[in-house]
Amino acid sequence: MKSIDPDDFKVVSPIRLSEIPTNLRNKSDDAEKEEKLDKVQVKLSALQDVMYAHNRYGVLICLQGMDTSGKDSLIREVFKEFNPRGVEVFTFKTPNSAELEHDYLWRHYLALPEKGKFSVFNRTHYENVLVTRVHPEYVMSENLPGILSVEDITPEFWENRMEQINNFEKHITQNGTIVLKFFLYLSKEEQRKRLMRRLEEVEHHWKFSPGDLKEREHWDEYMQYYEEAINKTSKKHAPWYIVPADDKEMARYIVAKIIWEEMQRHTDIKEPELDEKVKANFEMYKEILKKE
C-alpha cells in the first residue's frame, strides 16, 4: 500500500469537488488496511497518554460528510484503543430550546476538549453553513436581530457566518486546541448503495430514515456549499482534509494516519521531566514501600 501523505488530502488552495476522486482504488485488501489501522490506533492511544501528562494541548477532530459517509464507524474504529477518559464524542443534532437561547457556536464551545484530551465532533459547527443554507428556514428559530423572514438572509449573512467560524477556530487554536477537519467525500452512487443496504438487510433497518432520501434530493446544493465552505475556511491553523469515503476501511486508515502525522509536527508534546529532588530520593521511596 502506498504511504499516506497528509499533504495529498489537505486543502491548501481552492478546490473543485468534481475534480477530486471519492475512491483511491487502492489495490490493498481489507485485511492489510485493518492491520495498518491497528498499528496507528495503538500509536495514537500512546500519544494521548503523553498529551495528558504534558497538559498543554487539546485536539479537536471535526468530521463532516453526507448521510452514510461512515462517520460513526470511523469514530469507533480510529479511537477504540484510547483510554475512554481521553476522548469524548459529540453529535450535534437540531439545537434544543436551551441552545437556541445562545448564539450558534455556544454549544460547540462547551464541547471543546480539555487539555490532554481529544474531542470528536460527529457533524460540527459547519452544519450552520451547510444544512442551514440548504434549508434557510432553520435560521428563523435562532431569533436573530434583523432576520424577520427567509428573505432577510442575504449572501452577506453567510459570508459573515463563515468569517465568524474562522475567528472561532483561530481563537481556540491560539489557546491550545489543535484543530483537524475531515470531509468524508462520498459519491452519490455509493450513498445509494448504502441506503439500499439499510432497506434490504434486517440488521441495518434501524439506521434508515426517510429523511435521508429527502436530503439526497439536495445533493448538488450540498456539494456546492461544502465546496464553498471548505475553500473559505481551510486555514493553516485549522486545515480541511478531503478524504475519499467510498471505501470505508481506507477512509478510516487515512484519517487515523493524518491525525498521527499531523500530531508529529507538535514536537513540544513530551512527558514532563520529574523533579530532580524527587528522582534523587527514589531509593529512599523504595525502602519505605519495602518496609510496609
Image: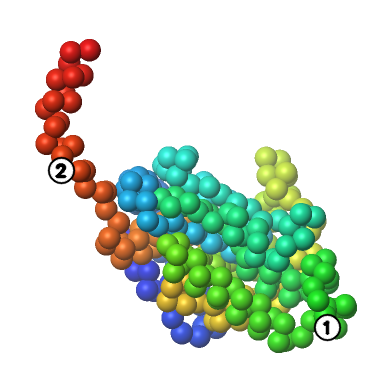
Residue 118 lies left or right of residue 288; in this view the side is right
Task: Looking at this view, name the residue that lies furthest to the right.
Answer: 149
Identify residue for label 2: 276
Name the quarter where the C terminus is drawn. Answer: top left
Corner quadrant of residue 202: top right
Query: How did the renderer colour the structure?
Result: rainbow
Q: Which residue is located at x 47 percent, y 77 percent? A: 235
Q: Which residue is located at x 42 percent, y 76 percent? A: 236
Question: Looking at the picture, does residue 176 appear above or below residue 77?
Answer: below
Residue 7 lies left or right of residue 66; in this view the side is left
Viewer-proximal residue among 124 and 64: 124
Name the quarter where the N terminus is drawn. Answer: bottom left
The crowding category of the residue bearing disc 1, from other C-alpha atoms within 10 Å (few below 14, some 14 to 19, many at least 20), is: few
Q: Residue 38 carries which label?
A: none
User: Which amino acid type is marked by label 2?
Assistant: Glu
- Measured from the top left, where is residue 55 in percent x and y? 37, 51
The crowding category of the residue bearing disc 2, from other C-alpha atoms within 10 Å (few below 14, some 14 to 19, many at least 20), is: few
Work out whether residue 87 can be spotted.
yes
Who comes first in sequence, dot 1 or dot 2? 1
Of circles 1 and 2, the one toward us is 2
Measured Cα–Cα span from mark 1 to mark 2: 64 Å
- Measured from the top left, where is residue 25 in percent x and y? 44, 66
Viewer-proximal residue among 275 and 55: 275
Question: Looking at the picture, does residue 128 appear above or below residue 269?
Answer: below
- Label 1's element? helix
Q: Which residue is located at x 39 percent, y 63 percent? A: 258
Question: Looking at the picture, does residue 184 appear above or below residue 282?
Answer: below
Corner quadrant of residue 220: bottom right
- Measured from the top left, where is residue 241 in percent x and y? 47, 70
Work out whether residue 200 can be spotted.
no
Identify residue for label 1: 152
User: Which amino acid type is marked by label 1?
Assistant: Asp
